Image (cartoon, coloured by chain):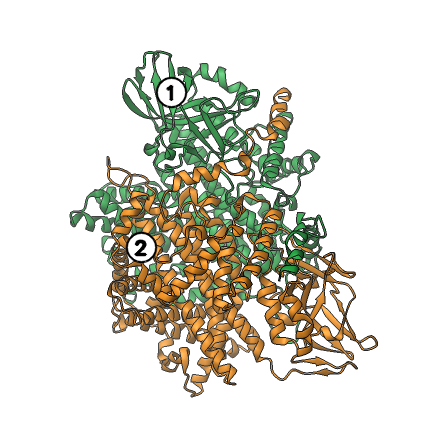
Chain colours: A orange, B green
Amino acid sequence: MNPDIKKERENATFDVEKLTNVLDGSPQKTKRRREIESLVLNDPDFKEEDPNFLSRSERYDQAVRKSAQMILKLREYGIADPDEIYCYKNCVHPDRPEPLDLHLGMFLPTLLNQATPEQMDKFFMPAWNLEIIGTYAQTEMGHGTHLRGLETTATYDPSTQEFVLNCPTISSIKWWPGGLGKTSNHAIVLAQLYTQGNCHGLHAFIVPIRDMNTHKPLPGIVVGDIGPKFGFNEVDNGFLKLENVRIPRENMLMKYAKVEPDGTYVKPPSSKLTYGTMVFIRSMIVGESARALAKSCTIAIRYSAVRHQSEMRPGEPEPQILDYQTQQYKLFPLLAMSYAFAFVGQYMKQTYHRITGDINQGDFSELPELHALSAGLKAFTTWATNSAIEVCRMSCGGHGYSRSSALPDLYVEFTPTCTYEGENTVMMLQTARYLVKSYRQVKNGQQLSGIVSYLNEAQHQRVQPQPVASRPTVVDINDLSSLVEVYKLRAAILVELAAKSIQQELQRRKSEEDAWNNSAIDLVRASDAHCHYVVVKLFTDKLGEIGDTAVHSVLSALALLYALQGITQNSGDFLQAGLLSVPQVLQISVRIKELLSQLRPNAVALVDAFDFHDKKLNSVLGRYDGNVYEHMFEWARRSPLNSTEVHESFHKYLKPLRSKL
Amino acid sequence: MNPDIKKERENATFDVEKLTNVLDGSPQKTKRRREIESLVLNDPDFKEEDPNFLSRSERYDQAVRKSAQMILKLREYGIADPDEIYCYKNCVHPDRPEPLDLHLGMFLPTLLNQATPEQMDKFFMPAWNLEIIGTYAQTEMGHGTHLRGLETTATYDPSTQEFVLNCPTISSIKWWPGGLGKTSNHAIVLAQLYTQGNCHGLHAFIVPIRDMNTHKPLPGIVVGDIGPKFGFNEVDNGFLKLENVRIPRENMLMKYAKVEPDGTYVKPPSSKLTYGTMVFIRSMIVGESARALAKSCTIAIRYSAVRHQSEMRPGEPEPQILDYQTQQYKLFPLLAMSYAFAFVGQYMKQTYHRITGDINQGDFSELPELHALSAGLKAFTTWATNSAIEVCRMSCGGHGYSRSSALPDLYVEFTPTCTYEGENTVMMLQTARYLVKSYRQVKNGQQLSGIVSYLNEAQHQRVQPQPVASRPTVVDINDLSSLVEVYKLRAAILVELAAKSIQQELQRRKSEEDAWNNSAIDLVRASDAHCHYVVVKLFTDKLGEIGDTAVHSVLSALALLYALQGITQNSGDFLQAGLLSVPQVLQISVRIKELLSQLRPNAVALVDAFDFHDKKLNSVLGRYDGNVYEHMFEWARRSPLNSTEVHESFHKYLKPLRSKL
């Protein structure tokens, strides 16, 4: 063990294991998680070549091998709980997507939700046994977020009782689905349904795309990989062009909507159920943000404890870079954010499960709020994490650029969360729509409940920002509940500001749509403030659940740092609205510095508590033992460019050049 | 030509060519640049395979081939002007670093600056003719910014008149130099010089590392590639471990410092000259920021003009995404920033050349200011550009993740600028040191000149921030010179705040060093405000040089947007200091929206003016003709994973799985 990092651990003021239990949910859950992880980490079948040393084709190959092993082993061990499967998978493919993700996460669940009993008989077991390997083909080259814009058609031909599928334009080619390029032999294709001369909108069809035996593309199917991307090297995101592909009528997923043999269209009873899946995935992404951020902080903080650089005092040894105030200021607020997002992730998961219970009993009342919250928080947490990973990486100096640090891969694997499952700006605007709607309900005399109930209190004079000095100051910057209150007021004011902006546009005789678009900046800002309030509130609420004094103390410091740093970064909002005075903003800067010093001795212990196994972290800089340099040297020597002493390009180009110059 | 983008160009209000000339410096320079570019772009010898489809070894191989060609052709054409060489190189390797960069950019210039006439005779011509291929080995695995911390030693042995070089520890292994891993046969090694029992600090030594004929590593030399990185795939950044390597005394670069045959050390007369190279490189990086940002904006804005998505008004066709206010708000401030940084880059280059002239006449007086300015602006522009590239990428939705967009590569090739040639936080603190020193000079009654002269005016009561309302408001938010003034006052206030923070720490009996570290957050903030002021000022100054009314008008709108957006993002600073009132901050938000609408018709023309040839941009999304989708499809089909219809992993893993489940 590196002596620096050993000393850090000795200086911690709290019991790391207790905090790990808080993050896992209980000591039992920590134990079970470790059991599952050790199943993978000690399994020689999952040994892998470092993907950084492989070509894309080799990376894909290795991922398919491991995924196939994973399916076998999960069944062998009888692991069936979704959380445990998720844990196992994240250990097999350490936070990397894999070729069977869409088969397991979309194809099978979609069958479960939307197939008729006859379709289940025909498709589910073959898919369960991986004879059928499927993907979910929705996005097209020219169409993403806006589902009504999708162009692929499925036209019913009653003479043969078949659907004829077509991608009539280049922009209608299915594009991006994971596992589509090489892995899948079936796809659930989302297409505009035409029957009896009418379009009935988007429906789902099971389309065989490759021969079950030879795996070659079927007639009329143009399928392939969309080419290299920023990350996602293990996944064959694919394209699919359908050219007069005929499938039997029975291949339309008909649990809800139907097409009768004669072509008569039967409408679905309700559309609310599909809503739930999106909400679930977005809620999960909040947890993924927390995990990616926690990993990045673990790497950057451990490395900062063993890296020495420059001199603070002449003649003295180079200090640990974690002792520089600027380094603490980069990393500790992000560490606080990791904890904040972890607790928000826990809350979202619990809330989802609670509301799912209600829905199963026919109570949809809380779904709109959760839908709005999951959209906004997905955007809020992924954007923040996206920038934060890069701050962590750059805080490691040059070595953060080495793929051995794991930080470059962490970034490229994470950043798509800002775009997929709902582009972040669109997500923010969805939340804003809910906020403005709620605001208008209050204006119309309704009383709101739930997380937007603060809009009830909106004092209408507050929207006209006032000079700072004219407002009595009641905020205690050391009291979290007081800070929750100012975040709430800020959110209320910005929602009101956005609503008024729309109002003003309407008064200028703009259409509702133009008024909305012309206020979009304000709307995103309102959503952001709302989400920020929710995060600060949930972090504060969580502290109430922590029994252990030492853990409570260090988490309180983190929560305070998170809240105060957020105010500093948005001080204009708080000053503008008169929620804080100028001297308070200055006090906050001083208080943040104190918190950095206060957290310094616990920094390493706080990342240790995330409990990432070295093999899962897979970072030379983030090693638990802190022995960074020797392992970096060893890693470099194994890299493919060193497999020969002399690269052939010397003999091909450089040596011949001499005679020409 | 895509009709949307055609229409955009028809709607422009200014002559694109005239703006291009402003960016190049003159119509003649535009012409000459295009001539040089066409030499490369029309040359079949530079035809390349898309690097995205190659392995790292193949990418390196292709880069060496092109670099060798480049050397030949530059000599063939007689291109010798540094700017023209730079232009040619940036076309051969479109903004990608290449294996000979350090040979050309560091090894040869270091010989020129630091070699004796005898050393020139011995080393320069062989290096010029690429028999000797060299690199510059300074950074060690455990030591970067802090040069005094480097551990590699060169111990003089008078008995053989040789230096004995050693890397005594793992952390002292030379790490990162470009071209070191595979390409170079020599390295200029920076090592602590020991002679007659004393250490004389860092000196430069020419060390042969590979056999001139076989290219195999010489005895005592452990050399190789440091492994895959975030970007820089064309470059063999290397490691070098020296184990009792003996070189003749004549291999120490002795133009300034010397070691006599008997081991007597002779000090260099002055150290100021090495200073200049750093300043030059940092100044160049400002221009590189501008170019990377301009490329990113070109791609994102052209694509936003042809991409249609969602519906703004029910029943109407999907609008161009450039019509969404949120999209404009993401991109137009970055477009403004591209122009701002381009003009700052021009200024830095001119200033460098002017001051170099002074230096050659023995006048070093302006060097400290330029040194401080180049450090801060390097950090300010690279940080801003780094984030901005990612905003551009994510503004392209899913397709921004495809390597065909060029945006992922733009990011990974650019981001190292935040760390190399001076880590950004360290750079900001260097500038802060100059600012605090200047501030103290004013306090001591000196009168400052140059860009920090605003500190002369510092009214001492201003540092105590006052309630917003108590201050008379004189700022005209539509007048750039008025905005330059508030940026200047903000900088002055933040410099004073940082200086006072140090003062307070000293009063608490902290050492000067601890006081500095405990004020580092404030110091970075002061530097940032200083640089921001400089950028707004230089952009505003530049407008005075623009004769063409239409060009002047659109650039003025961009400058205003840049200045106002900067205020919005830092509104806390301006409110806190009472420089702007709350109503003004609200007016600025409204004004920004107006500017977005005003710039909308010129957006495509403004990126066209950057005049990036399609082959140089190499982005499917950023194509001049806007024909995005068909070329994306074509690109994908060429990708290596599509070279076979069925990937072997199907037969190896997936098909066998069926029988096991």
Residue pointed to by mark 2 = A605
- The reply to whether residue B277 is visible in this rendering is yes
Please identify the quadrant where the C terminus of chain A is shown: top right
Which kind of residue does numbered mark 1 sit on? Val
Residue at left 46%, top 53%?
A41
Instruction: Indicate the position of residue A548 as horizontal and vertical percent values.
Output: 26, 66
Report x, y in % for residue A159.
84, 77
* Whole-number angstrom distance, CA of label 1 to CA of label 2: 44 Å
Chain name for mark 2: A
Q: Which residue is mark 1?
A: B164
Nearer-the-camera pick, A440 or B201: B201
Q: Chain of mark 1?
A: B
Judging from the image, what secondary structure is the residue with disc 1 in?
strand
Among all residues in the image, which is located at the extreme right?
A: A159
**Label 2 amino acid?**
Ala
Neighbour tally class for label 2: few under 14, some 14-19, many 20 plus, Cα within 10 Å: many
Q: Which mark is residue B290?
A: none
Q: Residue at x 35, y 71 (%)?
A: A537
Quarter of the image containing the N terminus of chain A? top left
Residue closer to the observer: B552 or B124: B124
**Foreground mark, 1 or 2?**
2
In the displayed structure, would residue A340 be above or below residue A612? below
Q: Are marks 1 and 2 on the same chain?
A: no
Q: Position of residue A552 (x, y in %)?
A: 27, 65
Q: In this rendered view, identify the residue nearer to me: A27 or B163.
A: A27
Where disc 2 sits, the SS reads helix
Res. B167 image quadrant? top left
Q: Residue sitting at 61 percent across and 65 percent down?
A: A144
Of residues B532 and B552, which is closer to you in this image? Answer: B532
Q: Is residue B149 left or right of residue B175?
A: left
